[in-house]
Each structure stands twice: as structure tokens, then as C-alpha cells.
Image: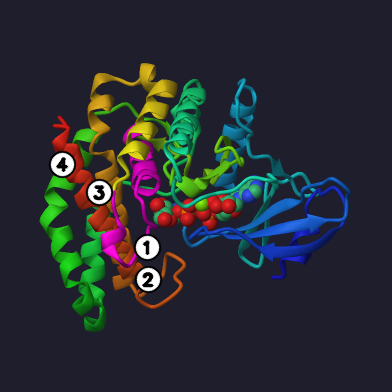
Amino acid sequence: MDPLSIISHFRLEGKPIMAIPFGNGHINDSYRVKVDAPGNPGYLLQRVNHEVFKDVPGLMENIRKVTEHLRSRSLGTEVLTIIPTKKGELFIEKEDQYWRVFEFIEGARSLDKAENAGQSYEAGRAFGMFLENLEDLPVEELKVTIPDFHNMSRRLEQFRESMEKAISSRIGPASDEISFVNGYAEEMEQIYLKAKELPLRITHNDTKFNNLLLDRHGNVRAVIDLDTVMPGYVFYDVGDSIRTGAIAADEDEQDLNLVKIDDGIYEAFFNGYLDAAGMKLTHEELLSLPKAGAYMAFIMGVRFLTDYMSEDVYYKTKYPEHNLVRARCQLYVCKLLLEKAKEHGSGF
Ligand code: ADP
Ligand code: GN1
Ligand code: MG
């Protein structure tokens, strides 16, 4: 369906004049929509990936609750604003495709990794505040939008199932990555089993660095991509930011010599997160944090590898080996972050 015909169903100010594909997300299709109303920054139209998110009404209801709750707090950041349809719905369904609209936050950037420690501190603080500000929204109020999203046991099971069905031309080039996953599977699963004792809180669950909008001074304008906000553990959020924000390379870097931890950025993220939310965390939660980045890098490596074996059905890819390259990089990131956690003598 044409985005411009879809957008006409929403309650906009002005007349839409163009819809341009936008952003670097791997899941949804996003368009920046410009309108002819003077001074209006326009809108972000998204086709929600219904293969990934089976319950779009539940997901949109989650976002409504979370954004309303955040708006009622005194925040330093902006909150996503849902634009309803002309009939007052949170989304529209046309030909089994689901569309929604947010106000466009203008003059902000999303970066794939932090450029300096200042940005990283602010990112940590923003995600910490996100946790803190949602503390009094009961966890049970939110639907689980993707079951077992960061469940290591389930992700490893899916990986093994994909291996059974994979064609040999996909298994051959991935032999090193398959060995790495098999070698670390038990250690990583143990972390998950221990995590199940931790308090279940409302977490974002997709805190990669480009799910923040920053202003030109490196301050956070908004936490975005709220599709996976649901019950989770704090170390998921800390880990996903660390594996993306604190590595001096892209998530899909092909030259592993360029993949390094930036210690200043790494420490700054923890400082920011703990300054905002540290007082709320239990002793066990604090103990879980040093290995968080390694855990999340490993689970992403497993998921990218699973998708490579399944011939790229989940993530958007730019070339045939893209998922393998992503998996290779993330498993390497896992190795680096695990070494760092062990240096610090992580007790989790
Ligand atoms: P995906 O699930 O595909 O990652 P996101 O919700 O993260 O989708 O959106 C994709 C990109 O669009 C973001 O990385 C960001 O650059 C941009 N974006 C998302 N929401 C807004 C918004 N309200 N205003 C401006 N840019 C946005
Ligand atoms: C996806 O939607 P996006 O691009 O922010 C994925 C995350 C992965 C990430 C890897 C719903 O995030 O879990 O960490 O790609 N989101 C979903 O880059 O699967
Ligand atoms: Mg995103």
C-alpha cells in the first residue's frame, strides 16, 4: 500500500505532501511524512512488522499506557506522541498490514554508536530514568509483545532447530560461529537461569544506541522504539546499550580488528544508568550488570546466526552474508565483553 494513501486516514495537521523512507531499523518500515502546515515538523509513519509482532493491538495499547505514564512524570526528555486515526484508533489495518503514526521529533539524530563518553553517560541516564519513571506502572499491565524475547534457552533451541533445516551452503561458511555458540551456550544459559531470580520490571528490551534521539549537544531528546517495552530484567537494557554504544565499530563490522571496547564510553554508560536508577536496584541486579553486555551480544549473535541459517526471514539484510557478518561481529563483541567482565571479577 502507498504510504501517502495510508497517512490520509490519520488525524494530521495540514495536507501530507511526501513520504520518504527513513531510519536504520531492522524490523519496521518507517517513513518521514512532510505536511504543508507551516512550522509543523511532520510525522513518522510506520508499517509495523506483523510477522514479528503478532498482537499489534496489544503492542499499541502498551505504547499508549507507557507514553501516557511517562508524560505524567516531570521528565527531562520528550515522549513519543501517538497520532490517532480519524476514527480515534491507535493504528489502522489495511490488507493485513498495520500502520501507525507518531509526531516527528525534528532536529534530533539517532546514532548507531556513541561518539564520546558524554553521549554515553546521557544515554545511560535516559534509559535509567526510563526504568525509574515506569516503576509505579504495574508490570502486569503490559502485554508480552514477543514471548521469550531474551530467553537464552529458547533462542538456543531456535538456533538448533534452524541448524537441522539449514542448507549446507549456509552451514559451511558459519563453522567458526557455530562452534563459538556451542562452546559458550551452557555458560550463557546459566546467566539466564540465574536472572530468572531477579525482579521482573518494565524494561525497554531494545536499548540499542540508535533507539535514542539525541540533540546536537549529545543530550537525549527521547527514548524511542517502544515496541518491546514489556516485563524484563534490568540487565537486558544495560547489556543491549553496552553491546552497541560502547563498541567502537558498527554492529555489522566486517573487520574485527576495528571492533574494540571503548573503556571511557563503557564506564560512562554505567555511571549514567546507575546515577539515574542505581538506588532502585537490588544487590543481585547490580551483580548481574558486568556480564550484561556479553549476554546481549551473545543472544544477538545467536539470533543473527539463526536467521542466516533460516535464509534471512526475520531481519532486513543488505547483502546475502549480512546476517552471518552481524553474527560474527556480535560473537566477537561477546568475547571481548566477557573478558572485560571477568577482569572485573563479575559475581553473576
Ligand atoms: P525499528 O523498529 O525498525 O527499529 P524505530 O521505531 O526504531 O523502528 O524507528 C526507526 C528510526 O526512525 C529510528 O532509529 C529513528 O532514527 C527514527 N525515528 C523513530 N521515531 C521517530 C520520531 N518520533 N521522530 C523522529 N525520528 C524517529
Ligand atoms: C532489532 O527494531 P530494531 O532495529 O531497533 C531487534 C532487536 C535487535 C536489533 C539488532 C523486535 O531492533 O531485538 O537487538 O534489531 N528488534 C526486534 O540490531 O527483534
Ligand atoms: Mg529501532
Point out the stretch of residues depicted in magenta: 234-260
Distance in Å between CA atoms under marks 3 and 4: 9 Å
Kindly identify which numbered label has been placed on residue 252: 1
Distance in Å between CA atoms under marks 4 and 2: 29 Å
The 10 Å Cα crowd at callout 2, few under 14, some 14 to 19, many 20 or more, is many
- In this rendering, is residue 333 above or below 222? below
Of the pair 188 and 342, the residue shown nearer to us: 342
243 drawn magenta:
yes
> Which label lies toward us, 4 or 2?
2
Name the residue type under label 2. Answer: His
**Between disc 3 and disc 4, whose residue precedes?**
3
Q: Quadrant of ligand 2?
A: bottom left
Residue 9 found in image quarter? bottom right
Residue 303 in the image: state x and y as whole percent. 32, 59
Kindly identify which numbered label has been placed on residue 152: 3
Provide the secondary structure element on which disc 1 rests: loop
Q: Report the residue marked by disc 4.
A: 190
Provide the secondary structure element on which disc 4 rests: helix
> Which label lies toward us, 1 or 4?
1
Kindly identify which numbered label has been placed on residue 322: 2
**Between disc 2 and disc 1, whose residue precedes?**
1
Going 38% across and 49% down the picture, which residue do you hit?
Answer: 244
Q: Label 1 near label 2: C-beta < 8 Å?
A: yes
Going 12% across and 49% down the picture, which residue do you hit?
Answer: 186
**Between disc 3 and disc 1, whose residue precedes?**
3
Residue 224 found in image quarter? top right
- In this rendering, is residue 20 above or below 203? below
208 drawn magenta:
no
Ligand 2 under 8 Å from disc 4 Cβ: no
